[in-house]
Amino acid sequence: MPVEETTRKLTKKEIIRRFNRLIEEGRIFDDEKLSEIMEAYKVSKVGKYSAIYNYTCCICGREVSEDDFFVSCRMKGTSHTWKTVKPVHKKCLL
């Protein structure tokens, strides 16, 4: 019996791969240059304390909740140079 796509558990590697594809398509960063030089490298869950700050999803613009993710992005080939964190819904990645 196949598991529905919305209830399936995503691994961190899958989330990073899908988010990188969205970056390459230009759907995450407004600037084309940023889309060329940025990559996703780390994923963390939105905790209950983070959820009270009303972060909005970088794809759909609606508020994220505890079941969603923060995806950390950095310049390709660097470790600590210029980083940003983007909140995203799990369903927006599916």
Image (cartoon, grey):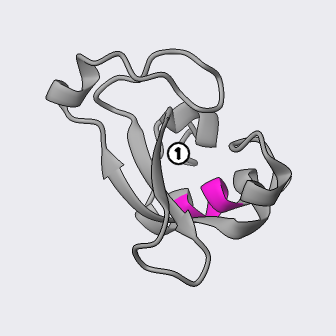
Taking 41 as reference, is 44 above or below it?
A: above
Position in image of residue 71 (x %, y %): 45, 51
Q: Disc 1 marks which amino acid?
A: Val
Residue 14 appears in the rendering: yes
Residue at the outermost left position: 49
The number of numbered badges drawn on the structure is: 1
The secondary structure that dominates the magenta segment is helix
Q: Is residue 37 left or right of residue 2?
A: right
In the image, the segment drawn in magenta is 16-20
Q: Is residue 86 left or right of residue 75?
A: left
Question: Image point 72% across, 54% down: which residue?
Answer: 23
Residue at the outermost front position: 81
Position in image of residue 52 (x %, y %): 23, 16
> Which of the 4 quarters of the picture holds residue 77?
bottom right
Residue at the outermost bottom position: 77
> Which of the 4 quarters of the picture holds residue 67?
top left
Q: Is residue 32 left or right of residue 71?
A: right
Residue 94 appears in the rendering: no
Q: Helix, strand, or loop for circle 1?
A: loop
Q: Quadrant of the C terminus?
A: top right
Question: Image point 39% across, 35% down: which residue?
Answer: 68
> Which of the 4 quarters of the picture holds residue 45?
top left
Check disc 1: other Cα within 10 Å, few if <14, some if 14-19, many if 20+.
few
Position in image of residue 29 (x %, y %): 70, 44
Residue 73 is a magenta residue: no
Q: Is residue 10 left or right of residue 28?
A: left
Question: Image point 17% across, 27% down: which residue?
Answer: 48
94 or 23, which lies in front? 23
Position in image of residue 55 (x %, y %): 40, 23
- Residue labelled with disc 1: 3
Question: Image point 48% across, 22% down: which residue?
Answer: 56
